[in-house]
Image (spheres, rainbow, N blue to C red):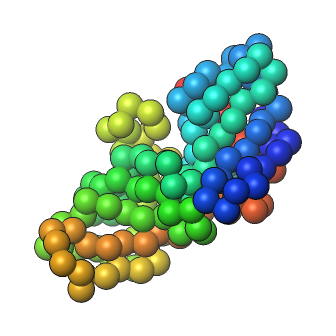
């Protein structure tokens, strides 16, 4: 599906796509690019659909680290980075670790590349680490997506 419009709000990272219900598009299905996960379809009409980008503040997905298999949840921040949440302090996480979808949320198929860990902060208070992920898919470069069920 081609991107025909982009959301203009600084916190909202959405796209309008040129495919809709008549093309077989359904709500809550994954959208990917050759680089990895782009987001999910959150609204569908007969001729168009809307994609919620992984960087949108309303986006979340169950993920795991490709090598260690440790699990967490990614959440959009409204900026270029996304946050990996619910990884306990004692878990070994390294900058450069690859993040993929886990399939546990029943929304996204297992194994789709999401991004790479770019920052880790264990200085905060609480039980979990602050982990920043740089997504493989850059919203500003997204022109087409593949919609998968």
Q: How many marks?
A: 0
Residue at the far top in the pictured view: 22
Q: Quadrant of residue 145?
A: top right
Q: Is residue 36 left or right of residue 15?
A: left
Can residue 142 be seen? no
Q: Position of residue 21 (x, y in %)?
A: 71, 17
Q: Quadrant of residue 27?
A: top right
In the foreground, 110 or 104:
104
Image quarter where the N terminus lies is top right
In the figure, 133 relative to 20: above or below?
A: below
Q: Is residue 132 left or right of residue 121?
A: right
Q: Position of residue 77 (x, y in %)?
A: 50, 63
Q: Which residue sits at x=76%, y=39%? A: 16
Q: Position of residue 18 (x, y in %)?
A: 82, 32
Q: Which residue sits at x=64%, y=29%? A: 43
In the figure, 11 relative to 45: above or below?
A: below
Can residue 78 be seen? yes
Q: Which residue sits at x=42%, y=60%? A: 99
Q: Which residue sits at x=56%, y=54%? A: 56
Q: Is residue 23 left or right of residue 88?
A: right
Q: Position of residue 105 (x, y in %)?
A: 35, 37
């Amino acid at each position: 599906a081609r991107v025909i419009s982009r959301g203009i709000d600084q916190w909202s990272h959405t796209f309008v796509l040129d495919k809709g219900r008549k093309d077989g598009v359904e709500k809550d299905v994954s959208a990917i690019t050759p680089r990895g996960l782009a987001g999910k379809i959150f609204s569908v009409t007969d001729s168009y659909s809307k994609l919620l980008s992984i960087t949108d503040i309303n986006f979340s997905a169950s993920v795991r680290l490709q090598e260690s298999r440790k699990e967490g949840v990614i959440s959009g921040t409204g900026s270029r980075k996304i946050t990996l949440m619910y990884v306990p302090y004692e878990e070994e996480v390294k900058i450069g670790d690859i993040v993929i979808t886990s399939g546990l949320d029943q929304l996204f198929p297992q194994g789709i590349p999401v991004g790479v860990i770019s920052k880790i902060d264990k200085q905060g208070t609480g039980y979990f680490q602050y982990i920043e992920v740089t997504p493989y898919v850059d919203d500003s470069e997204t022109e087409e997506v593949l919609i998968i069920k």
